[in-house]
Image (cartoon, rainbow, N blue to C red):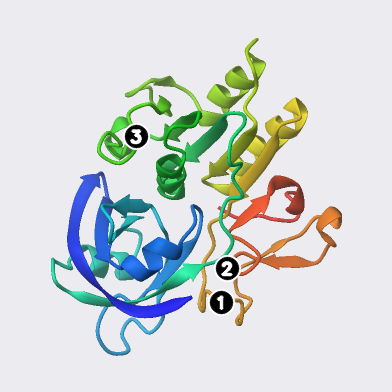
Amino acid sequence: MIDMRAAVRFNEAVAKDLFLMGLEAPAILHSARPGQFVMLGLGEGADPLLRRPFSICGRKGEDTLLILYRIVGRGTALLARLGEGVDLPCLGPLGRGFDLPEDGGTVLAVAGGIGIAPLVSLMQSRSGRPCECLIGCRTAAELVPLDALVPPDRVIRVITDDGSSGRRGLVTDLLEERLGRKEKPPGLICACGPQPMLREVARLAAQAHVSCQVSLEARMACGVGACQGCVVAASTGAGGGYLRVCREGPVFDAEEVDWGRSHGR
């Protein structure tokens, strides 16, 4: 874990209410795994008081760490105003990332909305190895352009709630079709998005007997497991009780989460 100040290299709108920020943070970047996150200070002084968690979206070059974020409140609205050269407090890499196979079968990434953020890093890390991605969002205006972010050999399919890109439906519709096809199933499913979507992804993966890891989104105050403000219910297989998203996650085996007792977004 490294606590440093990271200079903003760029901060640009890439889709409706979505921004991509590049931070000069080579020390964090070089030790990070797909699925880990950083806690980012949003301004000088004590306002806002708390840092915010952001998935490490990926890298650009050898020293620029990418953050993809949606404007959802005052903190992210402040972040969107920052320009090149501003230094921000940056703590990371934090949490548990995806446990990816070194070789073997296809990794299937399943993204809902802003959940594409950690999966960009995953797709970057799988260069030269089979990787597919299913993306679902509400409308075409919310789709993040991926051409400059992921290797060109990635197989990417899109679906939208309103049919404005791809066809109309949910990303879990695409997943159900993929798992039902008469071709070799993926070796691993990695998913990030709203919790109802993840619950359905976990169900479909279990039904198809495919290993599944999910990256959970949660509000965090400290990011290191001290405040316990980001817990989710653990399954009995994981010992019951609760799991800290920031410390034991944000990536979990889908079977570790008690989906019936967890009621996230």
**Amino acid type of the residue tagged 3 in the rendering:** Pro
**Amino acid type of the residue tagged 1 in the rendering:** Val
Whether residues under marks 3 and 1 lie with C-beta atoms below 8 angstroms apart, the answer is: no
Give the number of the mark in front: 3 or 1: 3
| Labels 2 and 1: the sequence-earlier one | 1
Report helix, strand or loop for mark 1.
Answer: loop
In the shown orientation, is residue 94 left or right of residue 70?
Answer: right
Residue for badge 2: 246
Height in image: 135 above or below 218?
Answer: above
Whether residues under marks 2 and 1 lie with C-beta atoms below 8 angstroms apart, the answer is: yes
> For this rendering, which residue is in front, 58 or 163?
58
Residue for badge 1: 224
Residue for badge 3: 151
Give the number of the mark in front: 3 or 2: 3
| Labels 3 and 2: the sequence-earlier one | 3
Give me the C-alpha separation between circle 3 and circle 1. Answer: 32 Å
Report helix, strand or loop for mark 2.
Answer: loop
The image quadrant that residue 30 belongs to is bottom left
**Amino acid type of the residue tagged 2 in the rendering:** Cys
Residue 257 x, y percent position in the rendering: 73, 53
Q: Residue furthest top?
A: 182
Residue 211 x, y percent position in the rendering: 70, 37
